[in-house]
Amino acid sequence: MKMKLMRVAFRNIARNMRRSILSGSAIAVAAMSIVLLFALIQGMRDDMANNLKTYYTGEIRLQNARYEEFERYNPIHLTLDWEKIDPILAQESFVKAVVPRINFPANLYIKGTSHAVMGVGADFAREAAFQDTAAIVKEGRLPQAGRNEMLMGSALARDLELKLGDRVTLLSNTASRGSNAITLEIVGLSAFPVGALNARYVWVPLDRAQKFLLMGTDTQEILILLQPRTDEAEAASIIRNDILAITGVDTDTRSWKDINVLYSLIDIAQYIYYLIGIFFFLLGSTVIINTTMMVIYERMREIGTLSALGMQGHELTGLFLMEGAFISSIGAAVGVIAGMCITFYLGKAGLDFTDAMSGIDMEISSILYPHFSIWSALFVYVYAVVISTAATLIPSHKASKIEPVEALRYI
Amino acid sequence: MKRRMVFILIAWVCIAQLPVFALTAEEIIGKIDDIQTFSTSVSSGEISAKDRFGVKSSTFKAWTRGTSDSLIEFTSLAEKGQKVLRTKNELYLFYPDAQELIRLQGAALRQSMLGTDISYEDMTGEKDTLAQYTAVLAGQETLGTHTCHVVVLTAKTRSVAYPMQKLWIDTQSYVVWKSQYSTQSGRLLKELEVLETQEISGRLLSRKTKISDKTRKDTETTLTITSLEIDIALDPRIFSLENLTW
Amino acid sequence: MKFVLSLAFKNLTRYKRRTLITAIAIAVGLMMYIMVDSMLVGAEFESMRNLRWYETSSVRIHHPDYWKERLQLPLDTSIADPYQVVRLLDGQGIVATVRTTFAADMLLFAEDFGEDGNISTLVTAVDPTLDNTVFHFEDTLVEGRFLAPGENAVVMGSWLAEDIGAKVGYWVTLLTRGNGGFYEAMDMQIVGIVNCPNPNVNRTLVMVPLDTASAYLAMDGAATELDLRLSDGVDIDEQTTRVQQILTSAGMDLVAYSWEELAQDYLAIATAKRGGSSAILFLVFIIAAVGISNTMLMAIYERIRELGMMRALGMPDKDIRLAFLFEAGGIGLIGSLAGVILGVLVNVFMVEVGLDFGFLMRDMDMGYRIQSVLRGVWNYKAIVIALVAGIVLSMLVALVPTQRALKMDIPECLRHQ
């Protein structure tokens, strides 16, 4: 009887194409929207994580062991011995890229007034392995090591009315707790995907920062990118122990997830958007349930006929269940595939939120790439099918209980 | 006859008492200003600042002219070549790696110099104390082995940073052993103490001074003058902006 | 016509289950739309309102030279006789209060705080009697009490208090420079802590009584700003111009700034979020629309045979179309009304109680000035749109199959499955 039921189910679907398409399409649209939303969320999350890792903390960050305790006082004199640590890191197989960085708050002195900015000393040659250095320059070029040059945030330059070729003087406190000033030429304007970086930051060659801040060959922090699928916390602890064993100096070595505030931002943003996702799920579900219920009631007479012809209650339920399952499988498949296609396309082209994002002080890029994830697609698919089929269950069960005579009378 | 003798005795006693109260607060301040101002000076010394992170020392050479012009050039390694020029009410900073002079004015003067308890503002301004403060003599106290006049200065205008100053001035040598700078209500902001003195050309001047910012915990700066020559001929170009950048 | 109407109406009641299911589809869809819209608009509205209630007020008045120096917080470019202006505005029916803002180092001492320390703060000196007519701080007290005139007291934002470990009763010293440049140290006791929905304020607020601060700072009765309150719905630019006119015609050399001008310094996010929330709203609308159309289409197609019968019985096409349209409209009306009522009910909850997100917002600087509770808002426009859309959409969607059926041969209609 099973085989026959299936055939009957199929035939019913084919015979009433319009109806099947209608209910299927409802399911498809709901599934597609949810896939899109999840892709957007994932894209945002990935993006945030990526920005944090590339521009702020790397996957593992090393700092002087006492730095965080005195962070409030900008203890630029609490440094790391780069020359000793670099070879140690080069030995670790799970390390993909390493960059030294010096973050120093400074004052930009222009025509008698000073403006607070954040300075970053970076080795641009090494940075190429860490981030797409070509992409961050909007105008001009990257500063060269050994020269008094700087890369200024484009928004900052605009606010201060500066352009390429202008010289500005940077004042800061040094590692020997005095102060120093250096004049640098603006050779490039930056276009970081994170808006905040363009509004307050200036990047200078590491060696100039070291000289200007009297840091010798030391650095303030070291950022590390790991080989894929490396456990960050474990790697951090290995690195810390190795450095301690070889140099005798303890460091503050942490995975980026343990650097509190920044990582929790991602969780928070994601949490909010999943809430919205749940909304969509509910909405989509009601549509699906509604549609399938309509189908059942529409076919009351048919149910009556089948019943009168001797079909058992559970067989009836089974029949409708199968029909429902089949339509929702196809409908959900269509919806999910359509959603994935759109995601794929947007994943390449990107969604431009630049205007929307200007001014936001959150580490999200202006252009978002929705993320193509097999797992979430599968999840939505299974969910859609299950819900739709379940939606068929109640009314079809009810239908099977009706007296044939009643059903036949139903118009 | 006897009566006349008593009268003379009493008169003598009365007259003998007078000199003790003859010196006014203004005169004392005037005397200090006389001792501490010279037409020119050349000195070298060391500033040592202690804070939560430890002690930082820098050495310097300084030239002064009158009460308003001074040039400090740092000679210690970390600050080598850095100069601070003060003329009247302006302050300029020169850093070897910078291609322009940094002019400090307004609120920027309130920053501390080299992380010490001395702010740039403390270094600017006229030394014309009596024009800005009213002086009152508040008796005498003994500080260690020194007997001191205690003079309280109250600001006449609102534009001076420290509304109240209290000075302990040696009755003999007019060395200001201790000075306290406070708010109008007497809240202590900064304190200066002279730890050692040296005699230069007949004047007793400070050799080692301790300065502490009393609003912060555990910070103090010690200024030591290791060599000092006064009233010598100085090339006036020392105090020019051009010299600063050379 | 009457016949058509009564036919439509009878059909509605006859096919109760179908009507119900379709109406439910419409209702749920619209309810969701109203809810999501309420939340998104609510967040934005609240953000703006929090800005006005706790930071910028509706309109602010400064000395003409103050604005360009405002980042330095100068005390010398102040309003000489602020209370005269307050009286002037009061005469015009505008509520105003007087404030002075200045920067200070807040010194903390080991006796109370465990260890000595200092942090730089922005201090707002307020008139305790007038301030609460313009701002809403007194409502947000969580510990202690508000300021009283003439005392050496401080009221602090709760996050700031938490950051430094401050409690009511602790003493702090505010070290600052008075009007002219002289150092001044104010010993103040913390008398109250506020927890207001504006996280930016909560993180930074230090409030002292105006007369106390003015005495210490030697302001001679002057103040750096006047803050005005205007009701929420007014056209702010218009009102700012009006205030400026009042000032100018009274011969006062002062400038009025609307909160939007002031907000430039504070936020640029409203436009941003609006883009994102429109997208979300659009998606919700799509889903709702699909649900509605779907159900309606099925409802109509199901009745093609009935329609055929009506045609066979001689009813004019026009009447049939109208009947079906009215019926669809009727279902749409029922569904829309139900949806709107449901939406309104949920909105009442959202507006009065709201959703609590407190634990999330603590360390975030998202630009949105909302803190713990996300409240809904009465956006009548959205509700009306929902209502109209529900009805119109239902009717439009019903039109298509009806037209198709009317075009078919009658026998075909009758044979329709």
Image (tube, coloured by chain):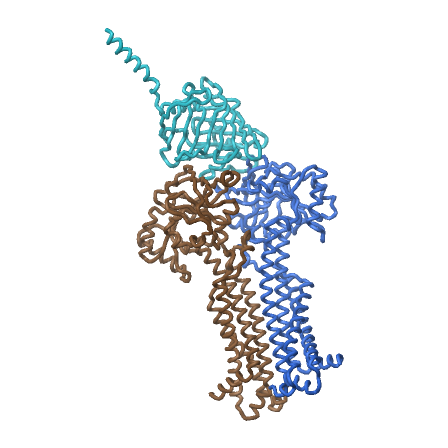
Chain colours: A blue, B cyan, C brown
Instruction: Name which residue lies at 67% across and 65% down.
Output: A379
Residue A127 appearing in the image: no
* Count of marks overlaid on the render: 0
Task: State whether residue C321 is above or below residue A202.
Answer: below
Q: Position of residue C200 (x, y in %)?
A: 49, 51
Task: State whether residue A321 is above or below residue A119.
Answer: below
Task: State whether residue A63 is above or below residue A17.
Answer: above
Position of C196 compared to B13: left or right?
right
Residue A210's image quarter?
top right
- Residue at the outermost top position: B1
Q: Quadrant of the C terminus of chain C?
A: bottom right
Residue C297 appearing in the image: yes
Q: Nearer the viewer, residue C237 or A33?
A: A33
Q: Nearer the viewer, residue C276 or B151?
A: B151
Position of A406 compared to A90: left or right?
left
Task: State whether residue B10 is above or below residue C184.
Answer: above
Q: Position of residue A212 (x, y in %)?
A: 59, 38
Q: Nearer the viewer, residue C298 or A122?
A: C298
Q: Position of residue A362 (x, y in %)?
A: 57, 54
Q: Position of residue A215 (x, y in %)?
A: 62, 37
